[in-house]
Image (cartoon, rainbow, N blue to C red):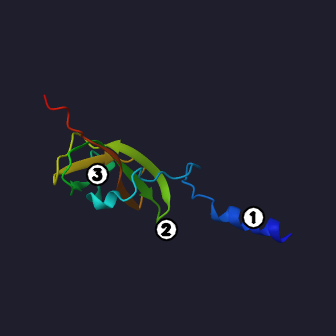
Amino acid sequence: MRVAAAIAACALLIVAPVVANGKSPLEPMIVGWERFFKVSWEPGERSGRSVVRGTVEYTYGTPITRVQLLVDSLDASGAIVNQQVVWLPGDLVGFQSAHFEVPVKQPAPAYRVRVFHWERIEAGPII
């Protein structure tokens, strides 16, 4: 009986949070992305549509490409109600900033923007 109770308790500990759409929420693919980026954002509006706009500052020296942002729409309690993964246009070289503006699918009380993924630009062979 105690074994069954222990197994049930452990199962409760590993249940992942669920987004409003019933799926487990996405997390940035690279742990520690905050060491390489500073992200600031604010809600806004363009042509009557809700947007999240801001700046990504790349604080490292290696050039990168294919940068993706994870935009979380949060309810009043801070729970994720929607997520979007969007591309940051262009490449970033060291210590460069880029601006973004993302139309959100539904307005929310708050938002959070994180760097979801990126790839380093490797130098080609020297001829």
Q: Residue at x 16, y 52 (%)?
A: 96
Residue, disc 3: 45
Q: Amino acid at mark 3?
A: Glu
Look at the image and tell me in which quarter the C terminus lies. top left
Q: Residues within 10 Å of mark 3 (few under 14, many from 20)?
A: some
In three-dimensional space, the C-alpha distance between marks 1 and 2, rounded to whole angstroms, equals 28 Å
In three-dimensional space, the C-alpha distance between marks 1 and 3, rounded to whole angstroms, equals 47 Å
Q: Amino acid at mark 1?
A: Ala
Q: Amino acid at mark 2?
A: Ser
Q: Are marks 1 and 3 in contact (CB under 8 Å)?
A: no
| 9, 100: nearer the viewer | 9
| 63, 103: nearer the viewer | 63
> Which label's residue is closer to the chain start, 1 or 3?
1
> Which label's residue is closer to the chain start, 1 or 2?
1
Q: Position of residue 74 (x, y in %)?
A: 44, 60
In the drawing, what numbered circle is on residue 8? 1
Q: Are marks 1 and 2 in contact (CB under 8 Å)?
A: no
Query: Which element carries disc 2, helix, strand or loop?
Result: loop
Q: Residue at x 72, y 68 (%)?
A: 9
In three-dimensional space, the C-alpha distance between marks 3 and 2, rounded to whole angstroms, equals 23 Å
Which residue is the extreme one toward the right?
1
Q: Residue at x 37, y 48 (%)?
A: 104
Q: Position of residue 37 (x, y in %)?
A: 27, 57
Task: Give the foreground label among 1 and 2.
Answer: 1
* 33 shown above or below 76: above
Q: Are marks 3 and 2 in contact (CB under 8 Å)?
A: no
In which quarter of the view is residue 103 placed?
Answer: top left
In the drawing, what numbered circle is on residue 77? 2
Q: Position of residue 22 (x, y in %)?
A: 59, 49
In the drawing, what numbered circle is on residue 31? none
Query: Which element carries disc 1, helix, strand or loop?
Result: helix
